Structure formats: structure tokens, C-alpha cells
Amino acid sequence: MGSSACVSLDSAQQQAWDFEQSLIRRLQQADPSAYELLILHYQEPVYNLVYRLLDDPTDTADVVQEIFLKIFRHIHNFRGNSSLKTWIYRIAVNEAYNHRRWWRRHQRQAVPLNRSEDDQETCASEAIVGASGSPFDITLQGEHRVLIEQALSKLKPVYRQAVVLRDIEDLSYEEIAEILGVSIGTVKSRILRGREALRRMLSEALEANPAMALTPQLAE
Amino acid sequence: MDCRLAQSLIHQAVESRLPHPESQQLEKHLENCVACVTRLTQLRSLRANLQRLPRYAVPDMLTWRLRVLASKHCQQHSHRHTPHWIATTIKRLQLALDGWQPAVLSMAAGLLAAFVLFTLWAPMYAITESRPVDDVPLIIHTKASLKSSWSTTLPGQEIIVDVLVDHEGRMLDYWVPPGQNWHSDPKLRRSVENTLLCTQFQPATHFGRPALSVLRISLHKNQVDVRG
């Protein structure tokens, strides 16, 4: 059983590898269908990653566009030293970090009166995963979500990156180390500190509002 | 195991990645430490809630923008090895053809109809070439020539004179070439002039038309010859 599970995992990894190699080859040959496949395959994870990494989520669409522009420009120089996925995620993390620095430097004060069409579409298309139970439970889950996302946005960028890549995007330690360009030990340290910071912030928030206590749930 | 060591293992336990010996040690510690149990519970709950955060759908406008970017980049890259001026020319031709596209079909039909009509009507209006039997090909230029002269008595020496002949074959003027001295004798000169006045010439022709020309003639006794 264990050995068959290992074989199927290796087989899945091999399939993923073959898919990536085929996609890279076709992208470098300027195959239009390969570009379409790249967008379909990676736009959603990149969008969600950037959404979580930015201070202002309304800039997500613009940053994602910049990310894909860089991907298109540099795919021909891609030598396969890393997997395509980690390469794309690295560009996404760097671009989100740069945008955040730019935003901080310019200290935008103005808040738009009307949200952009993309933002309205985002609001309209939000899906709350796992919303089930009574209306009270659904409302509580929604409030938990807001609480967690607020706490996440207050994390230091280096910790936020690590926690988002590990606990939300479910990447391995090796992949995260490759994306962030640090050692696995540093990745573990950042994840640990990020989770501790989140736990403290949420504990303080829940102490202020005991009705919103997080019900213990087993991690999957 | 103390709390400090336990806390370092708790994060691995949250992800169920703790090796068996350390897992057993941690479980033993948790039996007696409420703080560590609370911490582990909270971290597990936190991780579960993070994993349950919603996935946001990509806005349709963004997907469309990415597709436009991809299309442009794909097109640019496919011409990467083409010299710039060729790529630019191709692009301009494509733009021009796109602009003319609605009219191409009607233009092609018009051209085809014109070609068919021309091939059908052309033989009816063909110009047939007719050559006259007595047609003599024209010589581009003919020199003036002597036609007739009045017989006159001149001295024995040869008299050379250049004569200007008009388009009717009449003498208009004359010149004495270098080396001739007969014109110093008035009587002789008058006799030469009378002879020239009574001489008729065939005018020179240029493309079939009479033209002015100069003729060198010699007068000797009672003969008039053309010298050139």
C-alpha cells in the first residue's frame, strides 16, 4: 500500500514534470495555445498569492498583469534550473514585494470613492469555501475569515510570504526555499514566527470578542 | 521535555510531520502541560482556518488582458528572427489588407469581368495592317543633286563653288571655297552667277520632305558637276 502510494506520487510528479517541460518548450516556440494554457493554469494561483501578499488588494489585477508580462518576456531565457511553477511563483513574490515597497514609498492617502470594475468583479466572484451550517455559523465563518485576513495583512512581509506559501498555497519547504531564495531552515523559522505572530494577534482579537472564538478544527 | 523544546516540536506536529520518537515525547509532555496543549490547539485551528480561506476567482477583465498580452507577445516573438524592416512591411501590408478586406471580393469580381470582356471584344476592334503595293520605304536623308543647267561657256580653269539650294531646288546663295580666286574677276564672276541662276537642282530631302542644303559644284567649260 505504502509502496503503491509512493509509486503513484512519483508518477504524479513525473506527469507534472512532463507537462511543465512540454509547456516550456511550446512557450519558447511561441505556440499560442501554450500561452493560453499557461494563463489558464497559473492565473488563479498567482492571483490568490498576490492578493494575500499585497497591502492593498485592489492593486492585485495590475500586479498580476505585470507578473505575466515578465513571464512572457523571460520565458525564452528560462533554462530549467528550477521548475516552472517555482519560477513563476518567484516572479510573483518579487513583484508583489516591489509593488508593496513602491506603495509604501508613495504613501497613497487617497481612497477611491468608487472601486474599479475589477474590484467589483472580485467582490462579486468571492466564494467562501466551506460555508456550511446555520446562518449564524456562516456569519461566524465570514467574521473569522475577515479576522484572519486582517491579521495576515499585518504580518511582516517575510513572514507573510512564508505562511501564505505554506499554509494557503500548500507548497513544500523545498519549493518555498527555492522561491524565496533562502535555506530550508530559514523557511521553517519564518513559518514558525509567522504562525506565532498570527496566533498572538488572533488571541488578542478573540479576547476582545469571546463570541468569535475559533472552534478547534483539525488541520487537514 | 521542557516547554521550550516542546514548542519547537509543536509546529512540526501541527503539520503532522513529527517523527515517531519525538511525537511520543511531545505527547507525554502535553499530558501535563496545559499551555502547550492550548498552543498546539490554537496553531492547528489557525492552520485549518488558513487552509479554508476562500480562493478568489480571477476577474474576467484580467483574464482578457492577459490573453491580449499573450497574443501580442506571441506575435512579436514569431517575428523575432525576421529583420525589422520586413516585419514592419508585413505588418503594414496586413493593416492595409485589413482595411481593404470588405472591398477585396468586389474588386476581384470587377477585375475578372473586365478581363473577360476585354478578351471577347478585343478581336472585334483589332487594327489590321494594310501595306500598299507601291509603297517605297523612305530614306531618312537625301542630298541635293543637279537637275539641269544652262549650257554656258566658261574659262578652262575649274571653278568650285558652294551653293545653297532651297526646298524648291533653286539657288539662294553661293560661297567661294578657300583656295579659289575666280571671284576677283568681275566678268568671270558674272558668268558664273548667270550659270548658277539658270541651273536647276533637285532639293535635298529629310524624312521625305524637301530641305535646305549646301551643294558643292564645279564648273568647267560647259559642264556642271556635283562635287559633294
Image: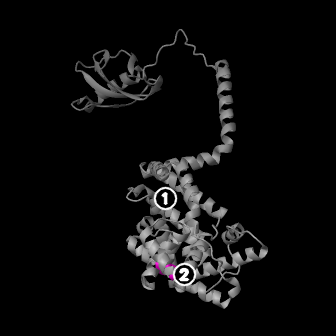
| Most distant residue in the bottom direction | A208
Please name the amino acid that badge 1 sits on. Phe
* Residue picked out by circle 1: A72
Q: On the rendered image, what quadrant is the N terminus of chain B found in?
A: bottom left
Residue under the image location 62 percent in, 70 percent down: B52
Numbered range of the magenta stretch: A192-197
Residue under the image location 53 percent in, 53 percent down: A35
Q: Distance between the residues labelled 2 and 1?
A: 49 Å
Q: Residue B131: image x %, image y %?
A: 55, 13
Please name the amino acid that badge 2 sits on. Val
On whether disc 2 and disc 1 are found on a single subunit, the reply is no
Q: On the picture, is A25 further left or further right than B102?
A: left
Most frequent secondary structure within the magenta stretch: helix
Which marked residue is nearer to the observer: mark 2 or mark 1?
Answer: 2
Residue under the image location 65 percent in, 40 percent down: B104
| Most distant residue in the top direction | B133
Residue under the image location 68 percent in, 22 percent down: B121
Q: How crowded is mark 1: few (under 14 residues within 10 Å), some or many (20 or more)?
A: many
Q: Is residue B150 magenta?
A: no
State which chain disc 2 sits on. B
* Residue picked out by circle 2: B37
Instruction: Tell me the tag on residue A126.
Output: none
Q: On the rendered image, what quadrant is the C terminus of chain B found in?
A: top left
- Quarter of the image for residue A219 reads bottom right
Residue B216 or A11: which is nearer the viewer? A11
Q: Residue A69: image x %, image y %?
A: 51, 62
